[in-house]
Amino acid sequence: MNENHATLCSSPEWAAHLHRDVLPVVTDGQTLGPRMLEIGPGPGASADWLRQRVDHLVAIEIDESTVSTLRKRFAGTNVEIIQGDATALPFDDASFDGAGSFTMLHHVPTSTLQNRVLAEALRVLKPGANLFCSDSLPSSDLHQFHVGDVYNPIDPASLVSRLQTIGFGAITLSVDYGFTFRASKPDPTRDGSWNHDD
């Protein structure tokens, strides 16, 4: 993460933006569930908001120094920090009631790896549970802002088909200055898409 990015993501202004404009919007009207996974928490601004709305928040972060900082920040709270790779999550199938990733996916270097992150999120969600995400729209300004850093923005026009191909069910996408989406893991018992004998 370059210096510009590290400074912005650690700022009170960025935390306020997430807490006011992003997280309440993407989770509006939805239950996060008692056990939630956050993928790529960065400095922890989103985790700070999420942990007040769940019983147990597990946050997985790949960067060792960030993990160390987060463990100190959230010591003694309901947040568990795990160091690991989101393309191969170290969790059992259907082990979370909700999952989220906020302004992180553009740091995943290829579309293939982004799809693997999304597929892993789907795998660890319980049937009927939601993945909540946000990210920024591609722009030349953001490209310059990320000089020296990984910057692989997602075109929201391609997102619905990508999520459907991965296996997500109901998808809600909103595009404004950035974009947010919510995608659910199909639940055969609720969606009526299973076969049974009478």
Image (spheres, helix red, strand yellow):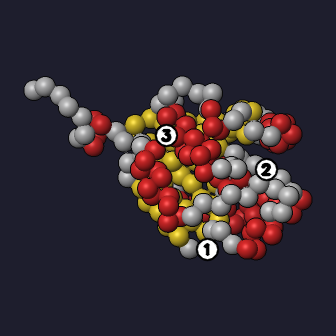
Disc 1 on helix, strand or loop?
A: loop
Instruction: Find the distance from the CA under tag 1 to the CA under tag 3.
Output: 26 Å
In x, y percent, where is residue 66?
82, 42
Q: Would residue 131 be found to the left or right of residue 110 on screen?
A: left
**Closer to the camera: disc 1 or disc 2?**
1
Identify the residue position indicated by label 3 in the image: 122
Cα distance, mark 1 to mark 2?
Answer: 22 Å
Mark sitting earlier along the chain (1/3): 3
Q: Nearer the viewer, residue 51 or 129?
A: 129
Q: Do the residues labelled 1 and 2 touch (CB within 8 Å)?
A: no
Q: Can residue 54 be seen in this view?
A: no
Quadrant containing the C terminus is top left
Q: Residues within 10 Å of mark 2 (few under 14, many from 20)?
A: some
Numbered label attached to residue 169: none
Q: Which residue lies furthest to the left in this view?
A: 198
Tag 2, which secondary structure? Answer: loop
Mark 1: which amino acid? Tyr
Residue tagged 1: 177
Task: Identify whether 175 is placed above or below 26.
Answer: below
Secondary structure under the numbered disc 3 in the rendered image: helix
Q: Mark 2 = which residue?
A: 43
Where 68 falls versus 156 (above or below)?
A: above
Pick the front one: 47 or 168:
168
The amino acid type found where label 3 is placed reads: Leu
